[in-house]
Structure formats: C-alpha cells, structure tokens
Image: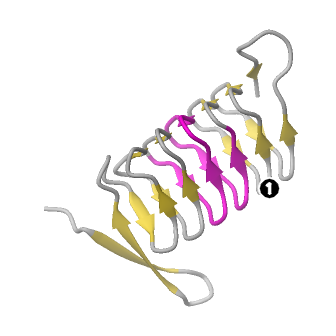
Amino acid sequence: MRRRYEELETEDGKVVRYQRHENGGGLVAKGARVDETAYVADSAWVDPGAVVEPGASVGKFCWVEPGAVVGPRARLGSHVHVGRDAVVGRGARLGARVDVGAGAQLAPGLVVEPEAKIGDGAHVERSGMPPHVLAA
C-alpha cells in the first residue's frame, strides 16, 4: 500500500509535503492548486504555487515547478519539465521529454514535438495553419 503523502526537504532546508491527487495519484504539494478534473500521473510532481487547470493531464515522471500554470485541457507527455512561472496555454500538447524553461509562455493549442527545449522566458506563439508544431 502506498503512502497518501510524501515529504521532501528542499535545498534551503524547508520541508514540503506532497499529497496524492485523487485522479491519477500524482504528488501535489501543499499550496499548489490542481483541479479535481485534472489528471496527475502517479509518478508526477506538482510543486507549491503551481496551478493545473480543469481537464489538464500531467503525464508520468513530469515535474511542474512553483508558479507554473498548466492550462485547461493541456496535455503533458511523459518526462516533461515545466519550469518556474512558465505557462502552458489552454489545449497545448507537449510531447515526451519536453523541457519548458522558467517564465516561458506557450500559446493555447500549441503542439510541441518530443524532446524539444523551450528556453527561459521564451514566448512561443502559434503560426500558420493549425496545429502548429514546434520541433526541437
């Protein structure tokens, strides 16, 4: 039987408590806001201050850092990292092993190919005919 919560000590000595999300069993920190209709895979982590909106899906081994926002109906593939204060727009689709830098902004409906790296502070907009795909 797995534990309902985990505690993690940060580099500065602060202890953060994570509880299992009802939909998927992922670990959600106290202070994070994850909608009950969102899915958080059992091996995913959502840090304090992060937001996961209704209908969003956070895949296996994902990490959503403090202040990051995963918009409504956005989909994160496995092993995706969403940096501090980054925003993944409504309905965006991120492939496996995508790395979104701190403060980056991804437009609604954007499709990002697996293994792409989005730099810190980048603003990635859709262009051309939908769906727009950003390749690594």
| Residue 53: image location, x then y, percent | 54, 48
| Residue 66: image location, x then y, percent | 63, 66
Q: Among all residues in the image, which is located at the extreme top?
A: 129
87 is within the stretch colored magenta: yes
Residue at image x 85%, y 12%? 128
- The residue that mark 1 highlights is 103
Residue at image x 68%, y 26%? 109
68 is within the stretch colored magenta: yes
Residue at image x 68%, y 44%? 99
Residue at image x 71%, y 27%? 110
Query: What residue span does the magenta drawing correspond to?
Result: 61-89
Which quadrant holds the C terminus?
Answer: top right
In the image, 1: left or right of 4? left
In the image, 77: left or right of 40? right
49 to 97, vertically: above or below: below
| Residue 118: image location, x then y, percent | 78, 41
120 to 6, vertically: above or below: above
Q: Residue 97: which quarter of the image?
A: top right
Q: Residue 50: which quarter of the image?
A: bottom right
In the image, 121: left or right of 7? right
- Label 1 is placed on what type of residue? Gly
95 to 97, vertically: above or below: above
